[in-house]
C-alpha cells in the first residue's frame, strides 16, 4: 500500500515529538507516539484477524496534531491540502505473503532518521475509507471518537498491545539514541527506499516490521564523537546587553525568576499561626495558601469589583496534584445551576493572555455559603495595579494643586510616563484576549488593572473571567446570551480606560473631570495612533464596534511585538540549551556515585577495589583528585566536563590512570571505561530490582 505523502516539516515534528531519555537516563525511555506502526501478535497473524485489528484504528483520533478537533488543524484549515493515496487490490494469497516477505515494488513512506513504518497488508486497505488528513470542510462518513479514558494529550494508542511494555519494545530502544545529523542532510530517493529489506523482530509475543536504512554521512563530513558545548548562537550573542553573562549556565535573572516561582508554588501556610481562617481542605483541594491578605472576620466592606467579599488562595488538587488558584466569593448562595452553561463555555477558552477557568463549585468549608472559582495558577504574577498604579506621586499631575499654580508641569515619557512601546505591547495582548473571548460569544467584563496579571516583564493575562457571568446570572431570562453584545461593547470601553490610565500612568486620569487633561497629556507625549485608539474606544459610536477595528490602528506595531516575542524565545531557548547537558552529566555522576561510594557489595568488602570497580575508582581520582606540580589541588571544570562527555560517548581515546600509591599505571580507553561502567551499574540495578 502506498501511504500518504507527507512534508519534511511534518516528519521532523513527528520525529521530535517522541520524548526520550538519553543514554544515561535512569530506567527505560518512555514509549514514543508513532503515527502508524503495525503491531501484530503471533497468535493472530492471519489477514482476517489483521483486518479486524486495523479497523479499530482511527488515525484522526490517534494523531493530536492532525485531528479535526485540534487547534493546530483548525488554524491551517483554510489551506488547500491535497493528499493522495493509491490503493492496490491484491488477492488474499498475496496478502498472506506480505506478512512474511517485502514487496520491492511498493512505494513506502519512510521517515528520515526514524524507525520505518511497517508495510501493511493490502487486505487491510479497506480499514481506511477516509483520507489520513481529513479536512474539516469535507463531509466524512465516520467521525473520530476517542475511547473512554483516552485523550489526545495522553498519547494513548488504539493498537495498544497488553503484552508489550516500554521496557521491552524494540522501537523505543532504537529511537532512544541521539539522532544522526547525517540523516537530515543526505536525501533519500524513492529507489533507495524500495531496495531496503524489511526487518522482523518479535519481543514479548509482539511482532514488529520495520526498515532501517540509515544513510551514510556525506564524504568529508565529520561529527564530534562525544557531547560538546558549542558557543552561543550569533543571533543571540549580539542581542544580549550583558557581555559578561555566564556562558555555560543560564542567566542569573532567569534563574532567580524560576526559583521564585518554585518557592511560591511550594509555599505552605504556617499551621502554628493559622487561627482557623484557612481550612485544611476545600472540596478536592488541599494545602491552601492565601495569596492576598485575609480580611478580618468582622469586615463588612465589600470589594468594588464584584460587590462581594473575596479572597484568593493557592491550593493543590488531589485529583491531579497540580496547583490552582481559588477565588472565593464569600456569602454567595447559588440557587440555580443553569449558569454552569456559561461556565462550560469559559472552560473551553484556552488563550495565552487569559487565565483559564477550570471549575466552579460551592462549599461550606469556610463556615458559610461560599462560591469558589478554580483557575490556573501562575506563580509570581502581580496585578497591573500593583506594578503601575501603586505610586501615590503619579497622581500629582491630576490631584496635586499648589497655591497659585493651576497648571503643574506635566510628566514626560521615560521620566514619569511609560514608554509607548510597552503600552502597545499591552494593547496587543489585551486585544488578542478580547478577540478570542468575543469570538466565543462571551464577554470579559473584568478588564480592570486589578484583574490583569503580569508575569515576567511584559506578559499579560486577564484574570477572574466568568465571575460576573455567575454572580449576575438572571434565571428569568430565556436567552442568557442576549446581553453579551452589550457586555462586549463595555469591554472595549474598559480597554480604552486601561490604555488611557497606562498612558497617564495614573488612574486619576480616567475620571470624568480629568479626561480632557489626560488626552492633552497623551497628545503631548505619544503618537497620534495611540490617541486615536483611545478616542475610538471611549467615544460612543453609531454602530457596534469590534475589537478587530483597532487592528489598523495597531498597524505594523503588531510585527514589532511579534519580533520581540520571538527574540525573547530565542534567548530562552539558548539558556535552555546550556542546561541540556547538565541533566545528562548529573545522571552520569549519580551513577558513578552509586558505584564508587559503595565500599562493599553482597558481603564482599573488596568489591570496590577489584575488577571493573577499581578502574572506575581510578577514573574518579583522575576526575577530581589531580594536583599540580607543587602539590596543590588542580581544579578545572572544563577537564571534568570533557572527561565525563568522553566517558558517556565511549570514545576510543586512551587515558592513563595512576594508582594512589603511584606504583602502577593503567592505560585504558574511554570505551573500556564505559563498558565497565555499564556492566557495574547493570549489576547494581539487577540486584536492586530483585532479578538476581
Image (cartoon, grey):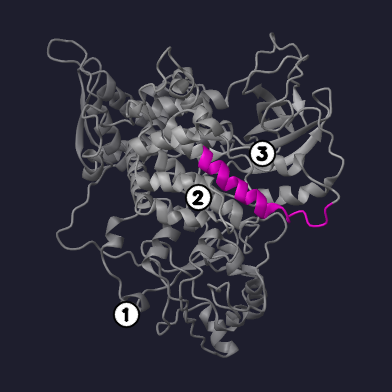
Q: Position of residue 617 (x, y in %)?
A: 33, 24
Residue 175 seen anywhere in this rendered image of the structure: yes
> Is residue 483 in the magenta section?
yes
Q: Which mark is residue 191?
A: 1
- Dot 1, crowdedness within 10 Å: few (<14), some or many (≥20)? few
User: Element under label 2?
Assistant: helix
Q: Position of residue 240 (x, y in %)?
A: 25, 35
Q: Quadrant of residue 636?
A: top left
Q: Between tags 3 and 2, which lies in front?
A: 2
The residue sitting at 65% across, 74% down in the picture is 55
User: Element under label 1?
Assistant: helix
Q: Between tags 1 and 3, which lies in front?
A: 3
Which part of the image, by quadrant, shows the C terminus?
top right
Q: Between tags 1 and 2, which lies in front?
A: 2
Q: Position of residue 638 (x, y in %)?
A: 23, 28
Mark found first going from the N terminus, 3 or 2: 3
Amino acid at each position: 500500500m502506498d501511504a500518504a505523502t507527507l512534508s519534511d516539516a511534518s516528519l521532523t515534528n513527528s520525529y521530535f515529538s517522541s520524548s526520550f531519555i538519553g543514554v544515561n537516563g535512569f530506567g527505560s525511555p518512555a514509549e514514543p507516539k508513532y503515527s502508524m506502526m503495525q503491531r501484530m501478535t503471533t497468535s493472530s497473524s492471519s489477514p482476517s484477524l489483521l483486518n479486524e485489528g486495523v479497523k479499530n484504528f482511527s488515525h484522526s483520533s490517534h494523531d493530536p496534531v492532525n485531528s479535526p478537533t485540534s487547534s493546530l488543524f483548525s488554524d491551517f484549515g483554510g489551506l488547500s491540502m491535497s493528499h493522495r493515496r493509491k490503493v492496490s487490490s491484491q488477492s488474499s494469497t498475496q496478502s498472506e505473503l506480505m506478512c512474511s516477505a517485502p514487496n520491492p515494488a511498493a512505494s513506502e513512506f519512510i521517515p528520515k532518521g526514524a524507525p520505518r513504518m511497517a508495510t501493511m497488508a493490502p487486505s487491510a486497505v479497506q480499514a481506511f475509507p477516509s483520507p489520513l488528513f481529513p479536512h474539516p470542510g469535507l463531509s466524512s462518513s465516520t467521525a473520530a471518537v476517542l475511547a473512554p479514558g483516552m485523550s489526545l494529550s495522553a498519547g494513548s494508542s488504539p493498537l495498544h498491545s497488553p503484552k508489550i511494555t516500554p521496557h521491552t519494545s524494540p522501537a523505543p530502544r532504537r529511537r532512544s539514541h541521539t539522532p544522526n545529523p547525517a540523516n537530515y542532510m543526505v536525501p533519500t530517493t524513492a529507489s533507495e527506499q524500495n531496495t531496503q529489506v524489511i526487518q522482523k523482530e518479535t519481543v514479548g509475543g509482539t511482532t514488529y516490521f520495520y526498515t532501517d536504512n540509515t544513510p551514510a554521512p556525506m564524504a568529508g563530513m565529520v561529527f564530534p564523537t562525544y557531547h560538546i558545548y558549542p558557543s552561543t548562537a550569533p543571533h543571540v550573542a549580539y542581542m544580549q546587553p550583558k557581555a559578561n553573562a555566564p556562558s555555560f549556565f543560564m542567566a542569573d535573572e532567569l534563574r532567580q525568576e524560576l526559583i521564585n516561582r518554585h518557592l511560591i508554588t511550594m509555599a505552605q501556610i504556617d499551621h502554628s499561626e493559622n487561627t482557623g481562617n484557612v481550612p485544611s481542605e476545600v472540596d478536592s483541594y488541599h494545602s491552601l495558601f492565601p495569596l492576598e491578605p485575609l480580611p478580618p472576620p468582622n469586615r463588612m466592606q465589600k470589594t468594588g469589583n464584584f460587590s462581594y467579599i473575596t479572597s484568593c488562595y493557592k491550593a493543590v488538587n488531589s485529583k491531579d496534584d497540580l496547583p490552582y488558584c481559588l477565588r472565593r466569593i464569600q456569602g454567595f448562595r447559588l440557587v440555580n445551576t443553569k449558569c454552569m452553561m456559561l461556565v462550560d463555555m469559559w472552560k473551553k477558552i484556552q488563550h495565552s493572555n487569559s487565565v483559564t477557568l477550570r471549575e466552579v463549585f460551592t462549599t461550606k468549608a469556610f463556615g458559610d455559603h461560599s462560591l469558589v472559582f478554580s483557575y490556573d495558577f501562575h506563580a509570581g504574577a502581580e496585578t497591573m495595579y500593583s506594578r503601575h498604579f501603586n505610586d501615590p506621586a503619579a497622581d500629582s499631575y491630576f490631584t496635586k494643586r499648589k497655591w497659585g499654580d493651576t497648571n503643574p508641569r506635566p510628566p514626560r515619557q521615560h521620566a514619569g510616563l511609560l514608554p509607548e512601546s510597552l503600552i502597545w505591547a499591552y494593547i496587543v495582548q489585551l486585544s488578542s484576549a478580547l478577540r478570542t473571548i468575543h469570538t466565543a460569544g462571551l464577554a470579559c467584563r473584568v478588564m480592570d488593572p486589578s484583574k490583569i496579571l503580569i508575569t515576567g516583564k511584559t506578559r499579560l493575562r486577564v484574570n477572574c473571567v466568568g465571575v460576573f457571568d455567575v454572580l449576575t446570572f438572571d434565571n428569568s431570562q430565556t436567552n442568557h446570551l442576549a446581553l453579551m453584545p452589550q457586555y462586549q461593547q463595555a469591554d472595549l470601553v474598559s480597554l480604552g480606560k486601561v490604555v488611557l490610565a497606562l498612558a497617564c500612568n495614573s488612574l486619576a486620569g480616567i475620571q470624568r473631570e480629568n479626561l480632557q487633561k489626560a488626552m492633552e497629556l497623551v497628545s503631548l507625549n505619544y503618537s497620534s495612533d495611540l490617541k486615536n485608539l483611545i478616542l475610538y474606544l471611549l467615544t460612543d459610536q453609531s454602530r457596534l464596534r469590534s475589537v478587530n477595528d483597532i487592528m489598523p490602528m495597531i498597524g505594523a506595531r503588531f510585527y514589532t511585538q511579534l519580533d520581540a516575542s520571538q527574540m525573547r524565545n530565542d534567548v530562552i531557548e539558548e539558556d535552555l540549551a546550556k542546561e541540556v547537558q547538565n541533566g545528562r552529566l548529573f545522571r552520569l555522576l549519580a551513577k558513578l556515585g552509586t558505584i564508587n561510594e559503595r565500599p562493599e557489595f553482597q558481603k564482599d568488602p573488596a568489591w570496590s577495589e577489584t575488577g571493573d570497580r577499581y578502574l572506575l575508582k581510578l577514573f574518579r581520582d583522575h576526575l577530581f583528585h589531580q594536583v599540580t606540580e607543587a602539590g596543590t589541588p588542580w581544579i578545572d571544570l572544563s577537564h571534568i566536563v570533557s572527561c565525563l562527555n568522553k566517558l558517556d560517548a565511549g570514545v576510543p581515546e586512551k587515558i592513563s590512570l595512576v594508582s594512589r600509591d603511584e606504583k602502577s599505571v593503567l592505560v585504558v580507553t574511554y570505551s573500556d571505561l564505559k563498558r565497565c561502567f555499564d556492566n557495574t551499574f547493570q549489576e547494581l540495578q539487577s540486584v536492586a530490582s530483585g532479578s538476581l
